[in-house]
Amino acid sequence: MMGLKRNREREPFTLEGFLDRLAKWVVVDDQSLDVVDCPELRDLLLYIGVELSDDDIPHRTKLSEIITTNFKQEYMAMLLDIENSLGCVSFTSDIWSRQNQEGYMGVTVHYLARCPATGRLVLRCHLVAFRRIRGSHTGVNIGHVFMQVLKEIRCVEKISAITLNNAGNNNTMMEQLSDELELLGIPFDKDGNRIRCFPHVINLAVKAGLKELTELPLFDQDILDLEASAQSTPSFSSDPLQNNPEYRDALESDVVASVRKWVTACRSSGQRREEFEETLHKLKTIDATMKKLRLVGLLKDMDIHWSSTFRMIDRFLETHPVSKEMIKNNPDLSQYEFTEMEISVLADIRYFLYVFHVVQELVSGEKTPTLSLVLPMYEKLLVMLKDLRLQIPELSHAISVSSTKLEEYLNLSRRTRIYVLAMVINPTIKFKWLEENWDADAYSNARMTVFNVLLEYQQDIRKQTKNSQRTESDTPPSPPTDSQSPPPISRRLVSLPTASDAARAQASGFERLDELARTLSASSIPAASTSGTNGSSSAANEDEATIWQHEDLEDQRIVEAAIRAYEQEGVISKGHPKMKDFDLLRFWQAEQGNHALFWRVACDVLPAQASAVPCERVFSSSKETDTMRRSNLEEFTMEELQILKHRYRNDRINFTEGLVCSERELSVIDMDPNVIDELMAAGKIDELKEYIDVSWEGWGMEEFDYDDDEGNN
């Protein structure tokens, strides 16, 4: 059975429904607006639509009007969703060029919300702008456009972190944005509110190391941005290489470039590709040791794709027996022959690149929070590279250059306090990693950062309480509660919630990284400025000052108690029952009532993106729109199409959600939904609980704690 089909009740035909679906298909499938003028399509629609007439089918102009109307409706609905977010809104942004060289800025928003259908916490992502950048792409110009987008989506006062790549104009853009927000009285720090795209940092470190091993394209902007003091050509003068001349000769021959040339030659014609495929099938047939070879072809590296050099070398080594046989059978390909030493060197380079590849994939998710992983990944990667220098001393010069580049960006990232907050609200990390890996001063400053942020939230809660009561009181408030969010939904009795696919993929990535680290191993953050309540702007009398002091001390006491209670619960580590299928969103779904102040932090910090991957994916999708047949699209139409397409694709129903079960879910097979409904309707809760307990028996779940499964204590 190739897939699952669900019967859907056919809706009565309406012209409005037809036009809406037609417009949606054109947008999502990147069809030309002229497609509705195709006689064959119109004939097809008339053939299957017995209630349609030719006048009902729109032409290009009418279709364009329908798409614009749909865009306005979806855009306003999106703004309402953003307005109702549970916390602040984070952003990613990048620049992309169309075929006609027009520059466009993509802007995505990320925020925490509740799924209307289930009540569960979800990370929302929307494309809110795909804006033409006119004139020079200076940071000032980009900052102006970004500020305009903020105003349009009404997020000027809800802005949190912005994730950008490491281009120099983004530094100026953040300065410009900070200046404009300051004029509006909105606090915003060009360093503190910026997140540097971690996969892009990894890419820079990889290229810095590769530059020591092979010639890289001169037009590569990342290479042009490397320090002028760096070597312009690979250097092979390290002691380990001098002691291993055969290895050095293989490196000096630029073995990476040799692979690239072979891949290009092998993919240059249909005949070569066919021969490669035939040789692969032949080896699998006649050689028992080759039966496990996958039926795959060679890959060519592309500068615009991260990890592409790793994938090119990895695929070449995987299929090397095929290349070797093919070269042996074609004397005209002898120039592409590889020695055993060259293959050995390539294997070492692949291992070097693989370390980065694993980390890069781990933090590139957009549907599960990854920001808390960044600083630990920096540190872990540096340790792994240190071990790798000992394991492959011949590549130590390249590994050292990559390490230096990583350390440079690690120091820059430590200036951004959101990394600390992201780690602390991750129950698998909390303060433990900071205490174990940072010096005493840095750790103390990090704790002070968390304290000050929680104090701001507590003071805000006090103000909200006063405003709601419309009375003045110097008595301490009751323990803070989340006034913005409804209480956690009750536990589902039959279908137990499991971690999301994104969370499971993240856990799998951690396992791969830990395994790699075990194999290889055979600073400071400035204190955040304390922003307390300054009281009335007018002269305050002594009694008011005394009340304010009491309230401030009480707020500090509440924050200290909140931190102490959060720490006393300990860290969720390997072997902990909650670690199975751990999902950060599910954790805070359950714990928001127990740690109200940290919950407020989670609402603001969890949506922050560790990478600009969401924008990269938008640009990949945009290439499907910007085809030769659609190269004359106006900039406003281009923006409408991209925003609509992103929104429509995000709204697609996942018909397999809930069908892929964990072992625990498969255990729940003996409960009749009708019986549950009857007991619930009759209010027979004790009988219902007994019925559930009986259903667990025989499946190894007799001691299952319902509350514990949801992460409650």
Image (cartoon, grey):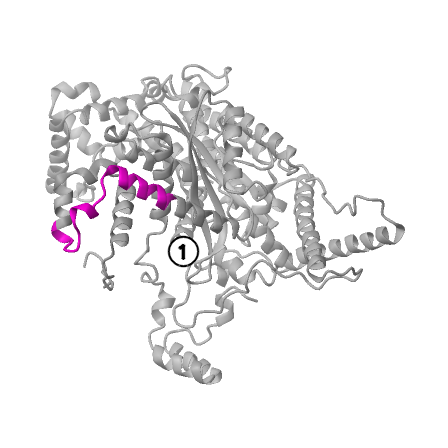
> Which sits in the foreground, 284 or 457?
457
Measuring from the top left, give residue 539's x and y in whole percent: 85, 44
In the structure shown, which secondary structural element does the residue marked by tag 1 occupy?
A: loop
Vertical comparison of 696 with 44: above or below:
below
Residue at screen point 88% across, 49% down: 541
Work out whether residue 484 or residue 360 is closer to the camera in this orientation and state it: 484
- Residue appearing at x 61%, y 40% in the figure: 417
> Could you tell me what secondary structure mostly forms the magenta stretch?
helix
Few, some or many residues within 10 Å of mark 1 (<14, 14–19, 20+): some
Kindly identify the residue that appears in the image at 20 percent across and 46 percent down.
Answer: 57
Q: How many marks?
A: 1
**Residue occupying the far front of the picture:** 55
Residue 67 belongs to magenta span: yes
Q: Viewed as shown, does residue 344 lie left or right of 581?
A: left
Q: Position of residue 487 (x, y in %)?
A: 55, 65
Tell me the magenta residue range.
47-71
Residue bearing mark 1: 500
Dividing the image into 4 quarters, which one contains the C terminus? bottom right
368 sits to left or right of 597? left
Residue 26's x, y, as percent? 26, 42
On the question of residue 377 being in view, the answer is no
Tell me the quadrant of the picture where the N terminus can be found. Answer: bottom left
Above or below, 610 relative to 663:
above
In the figure, residue 63 lies in which quadrant?
top left
Can see residue 555? yes
Q: Furthest residue to the right?
A: 542
> In the image, is residue 52 part of the stretch drawn in magenta?
yes
Relative to 165, residue 115 above or below? below
Q: Position of residue 423 (x, y in %)?
A: 56, 47
Amino acid type, residue under disc 1 in the picture: Ser
